[in-house]
Amino acid sequence: MIRKKDVKGNRLSYELISSDKMIARIVFDTNKSYHEATCIVDGSLYKVSRAGFWKTKIHFVNEHDDLIATIDQDRLQSPKWRINFMNKIYHMHYHNDPLFELVIYDEQYSYLITYKLNVADEHYNADVEIHNVAVKFSEKNLLLIIGWYLFMPIAHENSLSYAP
């Protein structure tokens, strides 16, 4: 479950909750058009930022500025992305049938995480589905944050009440 935690000044904060326990928090800097975020996952601090002229390359670094993951678009305006994460390659794809959906999957095309918009009582909501696959728990939590970093602006654009 995703819960909007608070909004203070130019900061927008969300928590990812599982079994009433916070597994991750991400704080977006709204002054930077959601291009920068700070995350806490399993007690460790991470930073997410975009690079390049079109801001299509995403860097995910730890508190020591070690590069943990890079996320690249296959080509400009493509719905497909490649995630190079801890020396493993994952893929991400945007779908829009019938509502927006973001899927992270492995090299064997096994879905790991699905973020999707749904409609309830004429309001859009965001759902997260974690698929039962063999990925380490800590890696899955980091992939959750990477996915939310990319999905949140779309969910935010479609509804102001998408997270309880």
Image: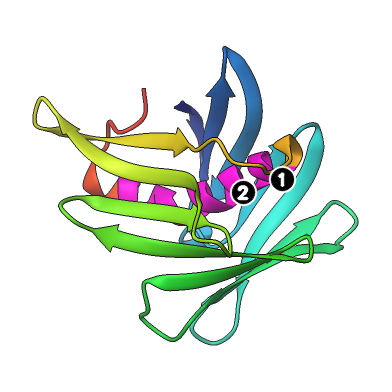
Residue 143's tag is: 2
| Number of residues whose C-alpha sits closer than 10 Å to that of mark 2, classed few (under 14), some (14–19) or many (20 or more) | some
Q: Residue at x 65, y 33 (%)?
A: 24
Q: Which residue is drawn at 46% across and 61% down?
A: 33
Coordinates of residue 94 in the picture (x, y in percent): 35, 62
Secondary structure state at the residue bearing disc 1: helix
Quadrant hosting residue 134 = top right
Residue 28's tag is: none
Residue 139's tag is: 1
The magenta region covers 139-155
Coordinates of residue 135 in the picture (x, y in percent): 68, 44
Quadrant hosting residue 27 = top right
What amino acid is labelled 2 in the image?
Leu
Vertical order, 56 against 138 (above or below): below
150 falls in the magenta region: yes
Quarter in which the C terminus is drawn: top left
8 falls in the magenta region: no
What secondary structure is the magenta-colored segment mainly?
A: helix
Vertical order, 119 against 156 (above or below): above
